[in-house]
Image: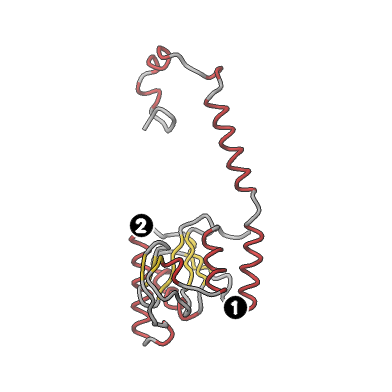
Amino acid sequence: MAVPTDLVLIGCVKSKSARPVRAAELFTGTLFEGRRAFAQVSGVPWYILSAKFGLLAPDDVIGPYDVYLADQPHAYRQAWGEFVCARLAALHRDLTGQTIEVHAGAAYVDPLRVPLGKLGARLATPTEHLGLGEQLAWYSSQRSRRADPPSVDRTVREVAALTAALTDQSRARTPGEFLAVGRDGFNRPGLYSW
């Protein structure tokens, strides 16, 4: 059984827009589009790994740049990995036991291994050993698999059940009954507490 993913990180690519835009739109090309589409439907927070800026939120506005992490010295890559993980820890507090799924090349994944391990996070790299064509096929298959609407159906069912429970007159209380319970009767999570 697959371990649920808590965060998704996607690697940047060389091809970029010629003007400043949101980070999610700056990088172009089929591979990045596949990664981005996967991250967007993952249902978990996601970020873009940038050789220049470290960790980018999808809505961060940046201009084009030309920095490739693999071309940087080992010390730069190591500091980059520490910086990215420090940003993640600042944004998400405790990463202990969290699964961080990374969709990027080895130049971006390798500097994250040790710092993520120090933070107690698990690193998942589902496309790590796939060639470019295999990665594109993988993202395509994931898109079609995730495009199924069961999660929407489940949400609709959950909302319907909640609505039914809240409108069930047999469970309703009069204001007098509500007040008679007193503060201790509502000292647990629920509609009228906390």
* Residue 57 image point, x, y percent: 40, 63
Q: Are marks 2 and 1 in contact (CB under 8 Å)?
A: no
User: Is 13 placed left or right of 54 in the picture?
Assistant: right
Q: Is residue 90 above or below residue 51?
A: above
Q: Residue at x 42, y 69 (%)?
A: 116
Q: Quadrant of the N terminus?
A: bottom right
Task: Tell me the kind of residue under disc 2.
Answer: Arg
User: Is 130 placed left or right of 28 in the picture?
Assistant: right
Q: Quadrant of the C terminus?
A: top left
User: Is 7 placed left or right of 132 in the picture?
Assistant: left
The first of marks 2 and 1 along the sequence is: 2
Q: CA distance from mark 2 to mark 1?
A: 30 Å
* Residue 89 image point, x, y percent: 36, 62
Q: Which mark is residue 176?
A: none
Q: Residue at x 38, y 79 (%)?
A: 65
Where disc 2 sits, the SS reads: loop
Q: Using the rendered view, name the quadrant where residue 47 is placed.
A: bottom left
- Quickly name the residue at label 2: 93
At label 2, counting other C-alpha atoms closer than 10 Å, the crowd grade (few under 14, some 14-19, many 20 or more) is few
- Quickly name the residue at label 1: 129
Closest to the observer, 32 or 114 = 32
Task: Tell me the kind of residue under disc 1.
Answer: His
Where disc 1 sits, the SS reads: loop
Q: Residue furthest top?
A: 176
Q: Using the rendered view, name the quadrant where residue 108 is placed.
A: bottom left
Q: Using the rendered view, name the quadrant where residue 60 is placed.
A: bottom left
* Residue 126 image point, x, y percent: 58, 70
Q: How are the colours assigned in the image?
A: secondary structure
